[in-house]
Image (spheres, rainbow, N blue to C red):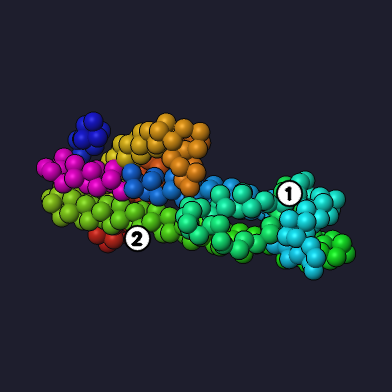
Amino acid sequence: MIRRWLGRDGVLPRDGGGEPWLAAVIAVLCFLACLSAVGALAADRAAHGWAMQLRSEATVQVRPRVHETGAEAAARAAQTLAGVTGVEEAEAMDRKTAEALLRPWVGDAVLPDLPLPHLVTVRLDRDAPASAVSLSRALAEAGVDATVDDHSLWRGEVERSAALITALAVAAFLLTAGGAAAAIVYATRAGMAAQRTVIETLSLNGASDSRIAGLYQTRYGLLAAGAGAAGTVAAMALVAGLRFLGGSEGVTPALPVAWSDLLMLSPCPLLAATVALVAARITALARLGGGH
């Protein structure tokens, strides 16, 4: 179909075999660019979800006083924190729950003899969460010796990782766009070299450099649009399949693919055509020696 479009005007002869390969390269590059974009969106979505969850929780490690058990100290800390503004719920973690959390890592053999910290889990108000400073102050006023962890360290790591993944995805997208532009430049130069007689004939008949460059611009713009559409459709099909397989969470909770990601891929054929138009025109004008 693309070859029929390119040959409709009858001015430029059809390429013997280079253009189908160029279309395949552009389709593959668009496919990879779409996957990079979806990966960046999914990673950013997952990171924001994790950061929101970490922001709405805190953990308090309690150290019992003399003549006080760890369970009593944790219960007293939970009662104190439950009354702090910005706290929805505070609950002392019993040993059975702590052992269940550690069992996958240390096994059952050492758990009975392992000294475990006395912890209080705090669920914060998502809209106006209490700060670590306010929680520590409340515990100190109640005479509870404790350390508050608001997960800010983990949250910072998650956000930095998300920013790095997004930057890598943007770099991959730019590299694929550069690869497509380089392929168009090579194809334009090769086509003009093979069609030198046609170009000379057009020039003798009054065609300007800008007009001749426009012919190559149109040809490779249409080719890139069609190839980009093919690559985008393939990427959409793959993303839709992953979304179906992953259910409500996308692929996994670590890579939540959404249906809205399909809409984000729709401009890819237009972007591919734009890159091809610009690359073909600049290359053709430079080859013709025109300044138009």
State which region is magenta.
13-29
Side of 123 relative to 83 (left or right): left
Q: Nearer the viewer, residue 233 or 38?
A: 38
Instruction: From the top left corner, tell me how far across and down residue 174 is, in percent.
Output: 39, 56
Q: How many marks?
A: 2
Mark 2: secondary structure:
loop
Q: Which mark is residue 60?
A: none
Tell me the residue at 44%/35% (across/down).
246
- Where is residue 73 drawn, in percent x and y? 77, 59
Q: Residue at x 51, y 33 (%)?
A: 248
Q: In the image, is residue 14 part of the stretch drawn in magenta?
A: yes
Q: Which residue is mark 1?
A: 91
Residue under circle 2? 291
Where is the N terminus found, in terms of image quarters? top left
**In this rendering, would 73 be left or right of 94?**
right
**Residue 136 visible to an observer of this rendering:** no
Mark 2 or 1, closer to the camera: 1
Q: Quadrant of the C terminus?
A: bottom left
Q: Nearer the viewer, residue 206 or 23?
A: 23
Labels 2 and 1: the sequence-earlier one: 1
Q: Residue type at mark 2: give it.
A: Gly
Residue at the spot 38% in from the left edge and 56% down from the top edge: 172
Q: Secondary structure beneath disc 1?
A: strand
Task: Name the amino acid type tagged 1.
Answer: Glu
The CA span between labels 2 and 1 is 75 Å
- State whether residue 103 appears in this view: yes
